[in-house]
Amino acid sequence: MRGIDDVRETIHEGIPASPGIAIAPVQVVARGFSPPEVYEIQESEVAHESERFLQSLEVTKRQLIELQSRLEDLSGDNESGIFEAHIMILEDRSVVDRVILAIERRLQNAEYAFYAVMQNFLEAMRRIQDPYLRERTADIEDVAQRVLRNFNIDGDVRQPGAPEYHVLVAYDLAPTETASMQRRHVTGFATEQGSVNSHTAILARAFGIPAVVGLNAAVIDIIALTPSILDGYAGKLILHPSPETLARYRTLMLAKEKVRSSLDAMRGAATETVDGRPLTVSANIELIDELPLVKRSGAKGIGLYRTEFLLLNSEEMPNESRQAEVYSRVSREMAPHSVIIRTLDAGGDKLPVEPLTDIEPNPFLGWRGIRVSLARPAMFREQIRAILRASSLGKVAVMFPMISGLSEVLRCKEIVRRCMDELDSEGVPFDHDLPVGIMVEVPAAALCADLLAPEVDFFSIGTNDLIQYTVAADRVNPHVADLYRPTHPAVIRLIKHTIDAANHNGIWTGICGEMAGDIRLTPLLLGLGVEELSVGPQQVPRVGHAIRSLSHAECAAMADEALRHHRSQGVLDLSLSLARKHYPELLD
Ligand code: PEP
Ligand code: MG
């Protein structure tokens, strides 16, 4: 660990998860209790800030002593030992001294200085093998949270001035936390955990927040408010950047901005290859907050609406009429373009629709996607009815996630048919020709695509899951990130097999996994014959430009060669060589 006042430029490497550059001071959010606001104080405020800290400790101690005596009255001596241990934590001289030192030397506000010291302490405890000591971390978190609350008790809290913009560094972030970042002055984030295809990274890309995951540094060793540059292109977090590094990044930001505005100018243009093959570029969304971004992007519709994000603010899916309102708004706002609404895909690394009583050993292989919906017919019917109701207001399609075989498809279709009958008898209008599609994201579905295609109107290949299930590498585990290869020969064969089955049955195939937005792979996907690419709103203009620069015939010849290749790298190189030839300016 570096010294407290070390100001040399330091570079931490990670995995690039969302492109972009952020230049701002660091805010550290570690595991455990919630972080307070962080801001820099003046030297003249040091004494006052230290006093606030000591007062908060005193108040907490008094509260604990009172709790202890109440407990003694109720149940005798035995239980009150818990609070003695809590009080001892507050009296630990090394903690007190380190907090005061952080206030004096790092000029951190008292709450944050205390929080950071406690986090270091907790992190050290978590690494201890002894189960008794590890369990004590919960006690410490409890006391620490209480001290933090007591900072506010007499209202003597300095209001930080204008909102500070930060680069957030965290051990890990849940998709819910990423979703609220837009509103929280976060210009970029870096996490120790995570991978490119986690839902946290997908959301970062959707909102255009630069991000680095799988950081090779212990987050808790990074000091809050350290000046930093987050490079989401190269996957770097640079602390204390030198003036030369800062100048280099400012120039790079300007160059990227120039490319972005030239792409913006082409927003409305048709996405057709130079030899006249049209391809639809649509957008993936998680939240309706993204609609303005989608409209600005020039996307020709929504190729994937991840409805499980409706669970963000509640433990249950909203009822039918609330869902119908939300879906209707999306379909109205996107008209005349179409909106593909995917039914609930809770589970995996996403929000659970209901917490299971026993922890699943393999969540990605368990209670997820269509399995949950088919096991909860009342909830499933409400969602289908809501989607049908929205279909009278715009162009809507329904899509089922995690399909692994024909019987699931038939059961889903039967439920759709029954919901249609009900709405007919209630006189509620809807689109009787509502297209029904499935996600092809389980290898079983890709291999049986010829059996499934006659039953549906379209396929949308979910490469995020298809890759993880094909190569057996968890999409959110940084330790196996190297095995997770979109161009693995097995993956591209499955994609090809799916497209061929669709073509034989006269239905179209799109791709809505993250692979669709990777412009190094646009030549390969185009050559394999996909007809739609659904990507994060920020990627739409880039993918559109890539398509307009390519020739379908040239891509198809390259894809034929790629299908004969033995290695992922070889396949990637083939696709990349066409990308470099036709749109070098877009490649990072
Ligand atoms: C996929 O698996 O590729 C996909 C688009 O679905 P999700 O990322 O929501 O699992
Ligand atoms: Mg999926």
Image (cartoon, rainbow, N blue to C red):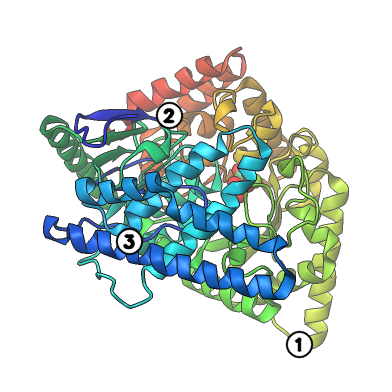
Crowdedness near tag 2: few (<14), some (14–19) or many (≥20) residues, C-alpha within 10 Å = some
In the rendered view of the protein, which quadrant contains the C terminus?
A: top left
Left or right for 567, reference 102: right
Which is in the foreground here, disc 2 or disc 3? 3
| Rendered residue at 43%/53% (across/down) | 91
Mark earlier in primary sequence (1, 3): 3
Mark earlier in primary sequence (1, 2): 2
Residue type at mark 3: give it: Phe
Q: Residue 427 carries which label?
A: 1
- Work out how far the residue at label 1 is from the one at label 2, CA to CA, in angstroms: 60 Å
| Rendered residue at 48%/61% (across/down) | 145
Secondary structure at numbered mark 3: helix
Rendering quarter of residue 502: top right
Crowdedness near tag 3: few (<14), some (14–19) or many (≥20) residues, C-alpha within 10 Å = many
Which is in the foreground here, disc 1 or disc 2? 2
| Rendered residue at 53%/52% (across/down) | 140
The picture places residue 461, in percent across and down from the top left corner, at: 64, 42
Residue type at mark 1: give it: Gly
Which is in the foreground here, disc 1 or disc 3? 3
Find out if the beta carbon at label 3 lies less than 8 Å from the nearest ligand 1 atom: no
Q: Furthest residue to the top?
A: 566
Q: Is residue 29 visible?
A: no
Mark earlier in primary sequence (2, 3): 3
The picture places residue 304, in percent across and down from the top left corner, at: 57, 55
Residue type at mark 2: give it: Asn
- Work out how far the residue at label 1 is from the one at label 3, CA to CA, in angstroms: 66 Å
**Compared to 119, does 561 lie above or below?**
above
Residue designated by label 2: 216
